[in-house]
Amino acid sequence: MNVFLWILQGLLAAFFAMVGLMKATQPTTKLAKSLPWVEDFTPGAVKAIGTAEFLGAIALILPAAIGTATVLTPLAATGLALTMAGAIVVHARRKENSVIGMNVLMLVLAAVVAWGRFGPHHF
């Protein structure tokens, strides 16, 4: 199970690092072409979301990899799951049903990592 959780952590970290960096560094006008929900948020809020996702991605891997403050890994997974819950609400309000499935998948994967790292397979 430990290997499975590491694989999930790696996949989640890669996904959230990529999308987080994109949201944190690109202008909102450019993001709106592929992420229409950004029109409902200020540029600062979009950058904050992206930064939180990027830092969450780092916290999924780094603390456990170096063996310091390993509690940050399940906390990051919990935070990312909550972020995806918020994303589901935003997309549901905007009637963007086609992307909710990906949000649900990421929420479930992050919740599995949080459960495993808080519970029976902690570091």
Image (tube, rainbow, N blue to C red):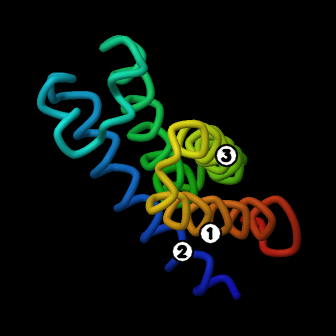
Q: Where is residue 88 in the image (x, y as percent from the top left)?
A: 61, 47
Amino acid at dot 1: Leu
Report how far apart the C-alphas of labels 2 and 1 lie in the structure.
7 Å
Nearest the eye: 7 or 86:
86
Amino acid at dot 2: Leu
Above or below, 6 relative to 68: below
Q: Which of marks 2 and 1 is nearer the N terminus?
A: 2
Q: Position of residue 2 (x, y in %)?
A: 66, 82
Residue depicted at 34% across the width and 41% down the height: 20
Q: Quadrant of the N terminus?
A: bottom right
Q: Where is residue 38 in the image (x, y as percent from the top left)?
A: 34, 28
Quadrant of the image occupied by residue 106? bottom right
Residue depicted at 64% across the width and 52% down the height: 77
Give the structural element (helix, strand or loop) at label 2: helix
Q: Earlier in the sequence, mark 2 or mark 3?
A: 2
User: Viewed as shown, does residue 47 lie left or right of 104?
Assistant: left
User: Viewed as shown, does residue 29 lie left or right of 83?
Assistant: left
Of badges 1 and 3, nearer the viewer stands: 3
Amino acid at dot 3: Ala
Residue neighbourhood size for the residue with mark 3, other residues' Cα within 10 Å, grouped as few (<14), some (14–19), many (≥20): some
As drawn, the label of residue 59 is none
Residue depicted at 70% across the width and 53% down the height: 74
Above or below, 40 relative to 93: above
Q: Quadrant of the C terminus?
A: bottom right
Give the structural element (helix, strand or loop) at label 3: helix
**Residue topped by disc 3:** 85
Q: Position of residue 101 (x, y in %)?
A: 54, 67
Circle 2/circle 1 CB separation < 8 Å:
yes
**Residue topped by disc 1:** 109
Of badges 2 and 3, nearer the viewer stands: 3
Nearest the eye: 53 or 90:
90
